Amino acid sequence: MKLIITIITFVWVGMVLGISFVEAPLKFRAPNITRQLGLGIGKIVFGALNKIEIVFSTVLIISFLLGEFSLKYNFVYGLVLFLLCIQTIWLIPVLNRRADRIITGQEVSKTYHHILFIILEVLKISLLLIAGIRFLKAFGLPTI
């Protein structure tokens, strides 16, 4: 269980970093990528990432239920799952509806939702790193 939790934690961090903070901003710099096309690609990519995150969180929950780990690890991972729920249930659908309006050429006003999504991504990555490093140290797994 320790190895599964460790692998999922750090792969999750890498995926969120790679997609949210590398792929997402860079796609709009590619030649001939319009805002509408970039948003359409973003909806697909972030939808796929969200599904993968749900699978990761499910495997983590099962791993924690089958293993006997301290509540302090469950709490930090629980915060990550809470952030993921906010994104999945509320924020991503709101952003998708906004993107759909832009894609169809409708005017949209500025909102705080995109900034909130970025903040939640930073928090999620930070919590995963904290939990992952603490988990490695507590169970004698190799650390940097």
Image: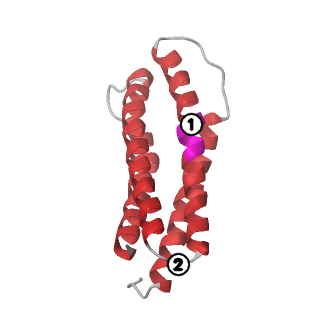
Q: Is residue 61 above or below residue 82?
A: below
Q: Residue 49 carries which label?
A: none
Neighbourhood count class around disc 2 (C-alpha, 10 Å): few under 14, some 14–19, many 20 upward: some
Quick check: can you spot residue 54?
yes
Q: Which of marks 1 and 2 is nearer the N terminus?
A: 1
Query: What's under tag 2, amino acid-wise?
Result: Arg
Name which quarter of the figure residue 9 lies in: bottom left
Disc 1 + disc 2, Cβ < 8 Å = no
Name the one closer to the observer, 31 or 107. 107
- Point out the image quarter for the C terminus: bottom left
- Residue at which label 2 appears: 134
- Residue at which label 1 appears: 89
- The residue stretch that appears in magenta: 85-90
Name the colour scheme: secondary structure
Instruction: Tell which tag, 1 or 2, sits nearer the viewer.
Output: 1
Residue 58 point in image, percent of width and height: 43, 54
Residue for point 55% across, 63% down: 77
In the displayed image of the protein, which residue is found farthest to the bottom? 140
Query: What's under tag 1, amino acid-wise?
Result: Ile
Asked if residue 135 is among those painted magenta in the image, a careful observer would answer no
* Secondary element at tag 1: helix
Residue 104 point in image, percent of width and height: 47, 12
Residue 16 point in image, percent of width and height: 44, 52
Question: Could you tell whether 124 is left or right of 54 in the image?
Answer: right
Q: In this view, does 77 lie above or below 22?
A: below
